Amino acid sequence: MKLNQCIYIFTLGFLVVACKGEAQEAEVNQEATESEVIIHTEYSGEEPTKPEGTEFYEPIPPVVNPTGNNGAPSDAIVLFDGSGFDQWVMTNDSTEVVWHLNDDGSMTVKDKTGDIQTSQNFGDIQLHIEWKSPAEVQRDGQNRGNSGIFLSGLYEIQVLDNNDNDTYVNGQVGSIYKQHVPLAKASVPTGEWNTYDIVYHAPEFNSDGQKIKSGTITLIHNGVLVQDHVEIKGTTPYIGWPKNPVHGEGPLKLQDHGDNSRVSYRNIWIREL
């Protein structure tokens, strides 16, 4: 009888302690939830009773012709329209671009000559770019139709022929290289033109060289959302962890992967945000 009572009392005591712990955890969670509540202060005060009370007429958005500048929006900077490389330089020495300029208004990587980049630097941007891998399939994995688009010259969006060609998923087409797997693979058939539409917000750094706000990338591949405002964790190296060097505006860079990838680009334009 006494043994049973002792077990009962111990068990009851345990339950009381457990319940107390759960109550404390719930209280902490409640405080955390309340501290994270989003309050829109512009909607505080007395609520309007007429529609005019929630209407405003400034600032007035600028008028943009969506096809006004060689097929690009009228406020866009056309970086490549097939007429030449006047907006570009070789990355390694800032000399004239030696990639192939094609009769169809595109350019093609010239193997083992090096990357190219814009002579102008950019911060936050909307970018439109079209690319294709060669119709003749050669090699496999990361050596088939491989190139890359580097934002601020540092953060790579992967270009790759992944059709019937599996590889590591954080390095496949549409990935933020070695960081973010795309939400879908939306490639057109090998040898046809893909489109990338990109919204990029650059990271921010304080005066001590510390990153205080991560950059973000949104990527639409052939009309399909494949990167949804993802955080840039740092640079996108082949080996090692992402790094966060302090930087301001930087160039748009296109990669020569060095394996006769023969990737082509065309219709490149940027809107500064």
Image (spheres, helix red, strand yellow):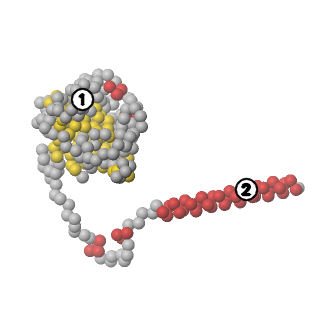
Q: Which mark is residue 114?
A: 1
Q: Which of the two residues, 83 or 165, is positioned nearer the viewer here?
A: 83
Where the N terminus falls, by quadrant? bottom right
Q: Real-space Cα distance between discs 2 and 1?
A: 69 Å
Q: Where's residue 154, x and y in %?
A: 31, 40
The residue mark sitting in front, 2 or 1, is: 1
Q: Using the rendered view, name the quadrant where residue 172 is placed.
A: top left
Q: How busy is the neighbourhood of tag 1: few (under 14 within 10 Å), some, or many (20 plus)?
A: some
Task: Quickly name the residue at label 2.
Answer: 14
Q: Where's residue 216, x and y in %?
A: 34, 48
Residue type at the position of mark 1: Gly
Relative height, residue 238 to residue 26 (above, below)? above
Question: Which comes before the other along the chain, label 2 or label 1?
Answer: 2
In-image side of 256 versus 22 (left or right): left
Q: How busy is the neighbourhood of tag 2: few (under 14 within 10 Å), some, or many (20 plus)?
A: few
Q: Which of the two residues, 213 or 149, is positioned nearer the viewer here?
A: 213
Q: Where's residue 110, x and y in %?
A: 21, 26
The residue sitting at 71% across, 60% down in the picture is: 16
The residue sitting at 18% across, 40% down in the picture is: 119
Residue type at the position of mark 2: Phe
Q: Where's residue 268, x and y in %?
A: 19, 41
The residue sitting at 16% across, 51% down in the picture is: 75
Disc 1, SS: loop
Relative height, residue 205 to residue 196 (above, below)? below
**Residue 24: in sight, yes or no?**
yes
